Structures are given as structure tokens and as C-alpha cells.
Amino acid sequence: MLNKYPLWKNLLIAMVVVLGAVYAAPNLYPPDPAVQVSGQSSTLEMTEREISRITAALDEAGIEYFGEEHSGNNALVRLTDRANQLPAKAAVQRALGDEYVVALNLAPTTPEWLLAWGATPMKLGLDLSGGVHFLLEVDTETMVKKRLDAQASDLRKAMRAEKVRYQGVKTNDDLIIEAVYKTEEERAKGNSVIRTEDPSLTRLNIERNGLFITQVSMTELQIREIEDYAVSQNLTALRNRVNELGVAEPLVQKQGRNRIVVQLPGVQDTAEAKRIIGKTANLEFRLEAGPRATNSQKETFDFRNDEFRKGTLERRPIVTGERVTDARPSFDENGQPQVNITMDSRGGDLMHRATRDNVGRRMGVLFIENKTRIKYSTNEMGEEVAETYLEEHKNLINLATIQSGLGRQFRITGLDSPAEASELALLLRAGALAAPVFFVEERTVGPSLGAENIELGVTSVQIGLALVIVFMLLFYKVFGFAANIALAVNLVVLIAFMSVLGATLTLPGIAGIVLTVGMAVDANVLIFSRIKEELAEGASPQMAINSGYDRAFTTIFDANLTTLLVALILYAVGTGPIQGFAITLSIGIVTSMFTAILLTRAIINFIYGGRRVTKLHI
């Protein structure tokens, strides 16, 4: 029978429409502004005591809130007004101190029954109303000092090999290595060693308190190269960390000499993002210091999980976390958390050589992290100002006896919890930061073009959609009504697809939606025009409907296929907003094909199919 779908096809169309409505529904529930608090360490639990301190700080600041909740080491408090987020953040941070990370957040309000179906709202890009903006500053001076310390260690080793008698070789606060000697003859020998070790270093001979000193420093070009490397390495590591967070269409780019901008559109757990992005976690593997080691050759550290237990290690590391290529959390045979480490070939060689030659000695795993601290002071205007600074912490994870030579793969034990193992693995896998970073600026980002422009953009879409609906009704009557229903369903299914896939909607994405609306209507115009032509040529109404859909299909399919290929190319070669446009357009092409062809025909079949029709209202 002409123009009658089988039952299974009607049920399939109905199921797609219903599921589209369900998975698009969460977008009707806007999120609440909130502040989220988490511990600097993943092992720091959030208790009712901390919640009370948070609410007391908000009460004292006169900020209205509701819906306090906490789980594990995270707490979240919803606010009644988004304008109060920054004052609330400042008040809570002051109350809790710098052991906790306080971040701005948008807390979801999706009903539980929708969440049970896995339905979540679509993410909005920074140019609309979602996401967070971080401005980070790279502590390049620390990187330069670290490189100079390594250089000083190499010079001491070379001088001992050449039997040069020196009083000391160390880096001062002015980023200058000072080599101190008792006699001028020893200084001449030392300068010869320095020149042989690295001819590019500049040397300046001075005398102080009867001692002969050579001041060794890097050139401006060398320092600039180190700083550029630090920023470039941090850019790569931060991009990897953002990818680990699963953020769609992030922006991580250099700004100025030593700053990095990180924008995370659609992110929900901003406190977790801030903690992972800003944390400078690294590992150093060092041999335990022998009984004959001097104070300049060894360092003493506390154990992370036992402040009364200490270990003394050699200053020079065997290998660092920068050589790690993969890190995965797991459990040992006793059910304790561990991290399985894989190093690159160079790191594997260094580890094998050191452990092969030191079987029976103990090797320590040193965990290094830089925590952001806050210091409050009063400026000249009498205003209280918060300043951030970095504080380095070095603690031993474990100290174990070397049983045999290790290679590229081994494991780290002695971790406090599975959460700590997962976090350490993530940080090592994403890549260690070459230099510490601290947050210069943090803010939630509203419309980049201003709220007024966003409103005008939405209004223009609504006006355009209304004009299309009126046009279709006037020119195609009943068929236009079917096309308008399909157009509304198309938008619902498109939003549902984007929500399920976790795509981020941006202003270019809205342009893609508008284009999709036009393409969907265009397909219906082709079909309806073909039906009119068939009627003009004398075909019966039922035959005209059947021929109109069948013969227009090839043209519609070819046109949409070529557009889809262009959208895929844009996604492959583009970045940021271009990818947002391409994603929306690609999904829109698929949904418009479904609604413009299958859904409109199902509606027309319901109206005209299987009946004796003498005239079509088209």
C-alpha cells in the first residue's frame, strides 16, 4: 500500500523522538552558581567541621547560600546570586587557609530521574556562559636555579676528579655559581676545569675576605633559552592534563613572556581542575646516602605518611619523573595501592645502570610538589591584599633495598590511598611541569561578546525560525505544517545528540544550528516542489507523494553528504570555534536527514496514507 510505513518503522521514529526529548530535557534546568572546596592533597578529607567553617564565613560576609553538600575531600555550597561567587570564594579561602583549594563552579540542577537515564545538560562554551578562565605564571627563575644547581654539581664532580682543592661551589640567590678557593693557584686550576666543562659559561674573578672566588654565570641568551623551554614544556604538560580531565574544546596558550592562559569550557569540577592543573608533582629516584657522605652530598627528608621517620639520600638523583612515559594505578598482592611506571629508553638505561651497580643498597622515591600558599598584607590605601606564593615540599614515598637491576618498568608502593595513586599516575602520565606555576587570575567567564549581543543572537535565531515557519505554512499548507513539526523535532534531537556526546555549544556552534535549520527546510522544499511537479504532470495524489519523496532523496543525500565531508575536514584541520561549528553542523546534517525525510513522511503518511485522496493541500 502506498504511503504507509510498517509498524516497526513508525515505532522506531517514535522512539527516536521520545529519547531525543528525554536527553534534551536537562537543558531546561540551568545550573546554580556555587563555590567548590577540595583539599590540596587527595587524602585530605572534608568533614562537617569544615562545612561549618565554610557556612560561618559566608554568613559573616552576608552572602546567601543553600544546598551544602560534601563527599570525600570535596564540598560544594550553592549560592543564590552569581555575582556573589567571587566574594564567597575570598571569604571561604580566608576561613579555611591555603590547605584547601576554593574554586568557582556551576552546580547542576538536573532532576534525579533524568540523571538515572544518563541524561545531562549540554556544555556551553566560554563565549556563552559556562567554563572557567585561569591565568598561570611560570616560575622560570626556579627552573634557571635548578639548572645552575645541576651545573654546580657537575663542576664539583669534575674538580674532584682533577684534584682541585676548593672551599665550596654553590649557587647564590643572584643566580650565580660561586667557586671559592684558598689560593690563586687553585683558582687557576678551577677555572681551567670550568672552561673545559662548559666554555659558554662566563667567569669573573674576585677576592673577598682573603679568599679567591670565581663567579660563574650563564649568558642572557642561555637564560632565555631555559625560560622558553620551561614555558614550552609547561604548555605541553598542561594540555595533556586538560585532556586527562576530558574537557571539550579547551584553550591552553602562551601569553606574554612567562604566562599561560587556560580556558576550560563546560567544566563542572573546577576545584579538581584547578588542583590538577596547578600541581607540580614530580618524582626523583635517589640512592640512600652512605656513611661517608658529606653534608654537601646528602639531604634528609621526612616520610609522607610518618613525620617521625626520616631518610637521608644523596643529592644527585638517578633519574626524575620527566623520563616517565606511562604511569597506571593498580594494587599489589596485599591489596595496597601502587603505581606502575614505564620510562623512556634513556631513563631505563640510567635506572638499570644505577641499580645494577648498587644491589643491596637502598633507593628512595622522593615525591616533590609545590603548593600554592596565600599571604595577606595591607597596601598603602589600607586595603587588605592577598598574595600567592609557592612553597616546595619534598617527602619520601618509600625507601627500599635494591634486590636486582631495574629496567624501564617497575612499580612505586607506599602510597596512602587509591585516590593518591590515581592522582600521581595522572600527573606523571600527563608530564611533569618543567617549572612551578601559580594562579595569577581565576574567573568564571560570561559571554565574550557581552550579554546583550548573546540575547540579540538568540533573538535573531527565533525571528528567523518564526519566518521559516510562517513561510512553510503559507506556501505548503498541510505539508508545511508537517515540515514545521519536523523542524522543531530536529532541534530537540540535535540538542539531545550534543548533550549525549558531551559536545560544547559555542557561538559558532549556534551558527551551525541555524545553517542546519536552513538545510532541513531546504530538503523539505525539494521534496514538496517535486510533489507539485508530479501533480502537475497528472499523477494521482498518492503516487505524487511517493514519487516526490523517492526521487528527491538522491539529490538531498548527495547535497548533505558533500556538506558532511566539508564539516569533517573543518573538524580535522580546525581548532576551537571552528571545531565547534563543525561538530554542530555534522550532527545537524544527520538529524535533519532523519527529520526532513523520515519524520515528515511519517506525518504525511498519517494524514494521507491508505486513504482515497482527491486533492492535496500543498
Image: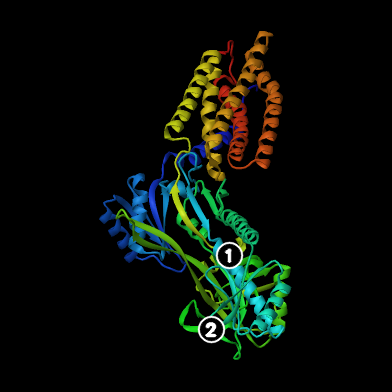
Query: Which class describes the residues within 10 Å of circle 2: few (<14), some (14-19), or many (20+)?
Result: some
* 65 w.r.t. 207: above or below: above
Q: Is residue 493 visible?
A: no
What amino acid is at disc 1?
A: Met
Which-is-in-front pick, marks 1 and 2?
1
- Report whether 566 appears left or right of 332: right
How is the structure coloured here? rainbow
Q: List x then y, in percent, for residue 293.
A: 60, 87
Residue at 46% from the left image edge and 33% from the top image edge? 454
Q: List x then y, in percent, for residue 424.
A: 56, 67
* 583 w.r.t. 479: above or below: below
At numbered mark 2, what does the secondary structure look like: helix, strand or loop? strand
Q: List x then y, in percent, for residue 505.
A: 53, 39
Residue at 69% from the left image edge and 23% from the top image edge? 550
Q: In which quadrant will I find the C terminus?
A: top right
* Nearer-the-camera pick, 111 or 354: 354
Q: List x then y, in percent, for residue 84.
A: 34, 48
Q: In which quadrant will I find the N terminus?
A: top right
Q: Which residue is the site of mark 2? A: 311
Of labels 1 and 2, earlier in sequence is 1
Q: Is residue 354 visible?
A: yes
Query: How many numbered marks have been drawn onto this rendered protein structure?
Result: 2
Q: Which mark is residue 143?
A: 1
At numbered mark 1, what does the secondary structure look like: helix, strand or loop? helix
